[in-house]
Amino acid sequence: MSVLTVHEPEHRTDQTEEILTERRLDALPRLTTTVPREYVHRASVAEVFLTGCTRIDETHFALTGQWPRAHTFFNSQNGLRHDPLQVAETIRQAGLCLAHAELGVLLGQHFVMWDLNWTVMPDQLLIGATPSDFSVEIAIATEGRRNAVTVRRRVEATIRRDGRTTATGNASFTCLTPETYRRLRGDALSVPPRTEPEEHPVRMDPAEVGRTRPGDVVLAPTDRPQRWLLAPDTRHPVMFDHAGDHIPGMVLLEAARQASCALLGPAATLTPVQMSTEFHRYVEFASPCWVEATPLPEQRDGWAGFLVTGSQDGKTVFTTSVSGPVARY
């Protein structure tokens, strides 16, 4: 005669439930999301390009990210490539993210960017059938005293897609407490960010500055052929993604690119493969900023290079050297 054994259900403690829950979660595929938008100083989640950050050791980090295929601003004119300036924005975001997530810089502190330099491989910027996943290898060096107001950090970045080097670059910045920033900025903080006035300078034609949409143009012509007025639309959803008390550095990089294209003429455009920028002062809303460009000698065949300088109130605010291949139509 067989005996049917009935097993009483196990008594599950709270600890048992936690273990089972963890096992169920481990069985799920790893989900992807962006890093907090606050970590990269963006208001729109759509403008956050980083998706993760891992510490390798005290000075080396690995980040992941994704560039959208149809970005409204960071795409080439024909829509086939990512804009090289998206590399600059990615390096900027990587430095900010690491500062907040790994280096103990508090949200609400201010960053002073001193320089930003990068080189891209244009063939690695092609847009494929899916969004462009990438990885970023970062090395951080600290210059000056640690935990001091004057400490400067330098990041060295290598961006890769599918294991291939897409770009390399570096940047240096200083982090300031709100109190220090207020002392540094002084009366400039009392000037509200400028909104688009009823009458604004007539900007350059987009075709003259390597752009396709009028709203992306940041330069207005002057009576001098190699000089322009910096005149961005402060309502631009990407360049002015969040409120600030000065013109963002990415706007200055765009001005350097557009000034370079303007010198080439309307039947040509330059792809900025190399760009090196020094930021000397904040560019204020309250007074005009003049952008000037001069050709650089000794460029390789099919390339052009320019030195672009911004000045405000008689003082140099930024200098940029930019070079790359020229396409003529």
Image (spheres, rainbow, N blue to C red):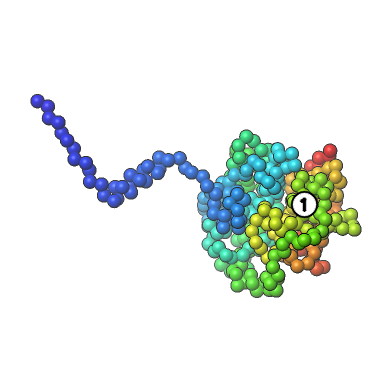
Q: Quadrant of the N terminus?
A: top left
Residue 289 drawn at (x, y percent): 79, 62
Residue at screen point 29% across, 51% down: 14
Quarter of the image for residue 27 reads top left
For disc 1, the marked residue is: 217
Relative to 192, is 205 above or below?
A: above
Give whichever of 280, 194 is nearer the camera: 194
| Above or below 61: residue 182 | below
Q: Secondary structure at mark 1?
A: loop
Whether residue 154 is situated above or below residue 80 in the rendered picture: below
- Number of labels in the image equals 1
Q: Is residue 115 visible?
A: no
Q: Residue at x 70, y 57 (%)?
A: 235
Single out the residue that lies furthest toward the top.
1
Q: Amino acid at mark 1?
A: Val
In percent of the image, x 80 and y 64: which residue is there? Answer: 288
User: Seen from this angle, which residue lies furthest left?
Assistant: 1
Residue 17 can be seen in this image: yes
* Location of residue 131 in the rendering, given as x and y in whole percent from the top left corner: 61, 40
Above/below status of 57 relative to 187: above
Is 310 left, or right, of 93 in this rendering?
Answer: right
Q: Nearer the viewer, residue 84 or 168?
A: 84
